[in-house]
Amino acid sequence: MDTVSLSGKELAAAINADTKDRAAALTDRGAPPRLALIVANDDPASAWYVNSLRKAAERLGIACDTVDLGADASADAIRQELAARGTDGATDAIMLQTPLPSGITLEDVSSAIVATKDVDGVSPLSLGLLAAGLDGFVPATSEAVVELLKHHDIPLSGRHVVVVGRSNIVGKPLAQLLLAEDATVTVCHSRTADLAAVTVTADIVVAAAGRIGLVSGKHVRDGAVVVDVGTNEAPDGKIVGDVDAEAARGKAAGLSPVPGGVGPVTTALLMRHVVVAAENARMS
Ligand code: NAD
């Protein structure tokens, strides 16, 4: 079987073109949309990601402040910065980078991000709104998976989607978004007894575990669609996904590449959220 590559580049370019226009309109009316990136680590992968977000923002006409609190910041210091940005009229959007300092979880501090500026949908309020089917910002990576499937005309209603991974920022919100699309959803995780036995029953498999090669040929039914969310550093320094692409290719009807699949759509949606937050703030 020919496996279609579910590239995210075309979709990301279309989203970015719209975002750029909307950012320019906001700038014409007074000030560019402004994103605050809060960092509390000295992790090289995080530094690379922050840099790529800064560049993406710059290309789209979005102002970006990076606040580095240091890798030994306390939970209180992080919460205080998040709260201060929440009341700062010049800041439209807030994103907290992970990893956080040792011993501090995202859940310890994310409630300090006001929902109207929570462009990556990580606060308990944003996640609760999503679970209840109410309006709010949703985690960009989860949204990117759904948008990528829609862009490639892959129907979701009535289909069985197996999500591998149950984190609060990818797997769980993705399950909610898929339910809202009328998919039948199964969520697997590190304690799932026989992963392959579950994933072979799927019309669509989404791998979001952060484990190189976790999803191989035996996990994929002939003709299923596979979305690879994983971004892992291979021993040779290259970024690879969670799917053994060689094994899945030829079996799957479609497979998203890493890089070039979910990643560019995620960044594009994050930047769109920044513009939406700014538009909402200027209207209120
Ligand atoms: P996480 O470590 O918080 O969660 C991983 C999840 O995978 C957990 O729920 C765990 O139970 C599950 N898991 C781990 N090993 C498993 C196994 N052997 N079998 C079944 N399930 C298993 O990670 P995360 O933050 O959710 O990120 C997941 C992956 O997605 C990572 O590779 C991350 O880099 C990537 N990611 C990509 C983007 C993007 O834009 N492309 C954005 C965010 C995260």
Image (cartoon, grey):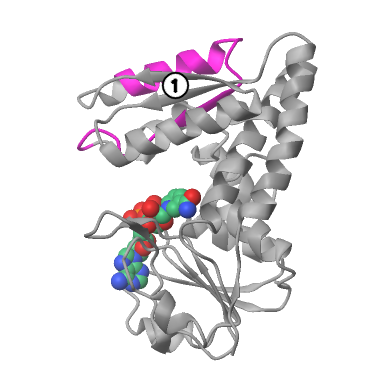
- Give the total of numbered labels: 1
Residue 211: % across, % down = 31, 65
Give the magenta-colored segment's residue range. Answer: 77-103
Q: Ligand 1, what quadrant? A: bottom left
| Residue at x 65%, y 48% (from the top left corner) | 12
Residue 27: % across, % down = 73, 15
Identify the image quadrant of residue 39: top left
Identify the image quadrant of residue 151: bottom right
Q: Is mark 1 within 8 Å of ligand 1?
A: no
Identify the image quadrant of residue 99: top left
Image height of 184 relative to 9, above or below = below
Q: Is residue 82 magenta?
A: yes
Image height of 27 relative to 222, above or below = above
Image height of 217 relative to 49, above or below = below
> 186 or 271, which is in the foreground?
271
| Residue at x 34%, y 37% (from the top left corner) | 46
Q: Secondary structure at mark 1?
A: helix
Image height of 108 relative to 142, above or below = above
Quadrant of the drawing holding the N terminus: bottom right
Residue 5: % across, % down = 59, 70
The answer to whether residue 106 shows anywhere in this view is yes
> 168 or 28, which is in the foreground?
28
In the rendered view, does 280 fall on the left or right side of 259? right
The residue under label 1 is 82
Amino acid residing under circle 1: Leu
Residue 177: % across, % down = 63, 58
Q: Residues within 10 Å of mark 1 (few under 14, many from 20)?
A: many
Q: Is residue 190 magenta?
A: no
> 60 or 278, which is in the foreground?
60
The answer to whether residue 169 shows anywhere in this view is no
